[in-house]
Amino acid sequence: MMIPYGRQIIEEDDIQAIVDVLKSDYLTTGPKVAEFEECVAGYVGARYAVAVSNGTAALHAACFAAGIKEGDEVITSPLTFAASANCVLYCGGKPVFADVDPRTYNIDPEDIKRKITDKTRAIIPVHLAGQPCDMDAIHKIAKEHHLIVIEDGAHALGSEYKGRKVGPLSDMTTFSFHPVKPITTGEGGMVVTNNEEFYNRLCLFRSHGITRDSSLMTRNEGGWFYQQLELGYNYRITDIQCALGCSQMKKLERFLGRRRALAKRYDKAFCDTPNIILPYQLPETNSGYHLYIIQVVGCDRRQVFEELRAKGIGVNVHYIPVYYHPYYREHGYQDCRCPHAEQVYEHIISIPLHAGLTEEEQDYIIRTINQILDGCRF
């Protein structure tokens, strides 16, 4: 049986929350959506939250709300899932990749500076593995160049930067509720913001650009009336999913505490292992440890990866640099180079870390990694 690198925890109260909705009047957009939004907004300390169908939809909605359009450039990290860049393309803009800091694996503010042009409109820093980016440096750059900052917090619900939760620090922050994330709604995403204008645009965008709000419409012919004001999408989330989200939010701190405890056990186990570089945590941050990413050095990463899989340990690699993908190579990124991201990619492996991982499973993982590294070909 494979030990997965990440998985959800679903308990009886989660199941009951879903059953209660199934017996109610609403299955799609109903009161649980608003309740979930209020729950997440209150937790992170944001004024507004807009729940959508998945994390990619959240990124797309944020780019739309920011006004990204054809000809605009948006700077982001290459060491991320493709959605962090695809969302820019969806709006007609151009993703520009800035290299990563080789310690944190997050976007390097110094390279952001080098990549800014007169077409740059926004920055999308990605909190890889739940480790917050250097947001003070990024905000300073954004302020100097009048840029919007959209944090990709897909991994970072509950992560902290200088004593504050990731979420309300920038113009907008997106979250994902995929099953391997800190909490899950099955699929689902959210954008949080303190900006009322962005909030209104996000609400329109997730529901076809349609409103029944008479204060926004050009006329009102009666209680049945609505108007499409923008070209939006059907990115709505369901009450079924949001009921699960509300239940899961009650457990988030427990889940995070467990992840952090397991991360400390890995730190202790591998601190003197010469073939492993451990994850680095930026000072004054508190990672949520969505992932535990090690670098394997002095060994064949592929050999280590395949031997771990063969022994029932579901390791993965997060991530292939986005511009390596054929679509990007075929659309103008064939000469793109981010040397630090490429070097990091050659060595990284994500080993299992989730709130349901037992210490017995973790001990087996630690022993197996050490055995494989002791016998690996140099």
Image (cartoon, rainbow, N blue to C red):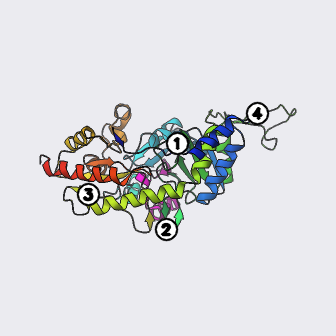
Tag 4 or tag 1, which sits nearer the N-term? 1
Q: Which mark is residue 55?
A: 1
Residue 155 visible in this rendered orientation of the protein: yes
- Residue 377: image location, x then y, percent: 12, 46
Going from N to C along the chain, the mark reached first, 1 or 2, is: 1
Instruction: Give the side of residue 36 with respect to residue 142, left or right.
Output: right
Contact (Cβ within 8 Å) of mark 4 with mark 2: no
Q: CA distance from mark 1 to mark 4?
A: 27 Å
Question: Residue 228: which quarter of the image?
Answer: top right
- Secondary structure beneath dot 4 equals strand
* Kind of residue at disc 2: Lys
The amino acid at mark 3 is Ile
Residue 67 visible in the current orientation:
no
Q: Which residue is mark 4?
A: 227
- Which is closer to the viewer, label 4 or label 2? 2
Question: Mark 1 touching mark 4, by CB under 8 A?
Answer: no
- The residue shown at (48%, 57%) is 256
Of callouts 2 and 3, which one flags the residue occurring earlier in the amino acid sequence? 2
Taking the magenta stretch, the answer to whether it contains residue 139 is yes
Tell me the residue that label 2 is attached to. 162
Task: Name the residue at 53% across, 39% down.
Answer: 186
Q: CA distance from mark 2 to mark 3?
A: 25 Å
Give the residue at x 37% y 41%. Answer: 322
Residue 12, quarter of the rendered image: top right
Q: Are marks 1 and 3 in contact (CB under 8 Å)?
A: no
Q: Amino acid at mark 4?
A: Gln
Q: Which quarter of the figure is the N terminus placed in?
A: top left
User: Spatial distance from mark 4 to mark 2, Cα to Cα?
Assistant: 43 Å
Mark 2, mark 3: which one is toward the viewer?
3
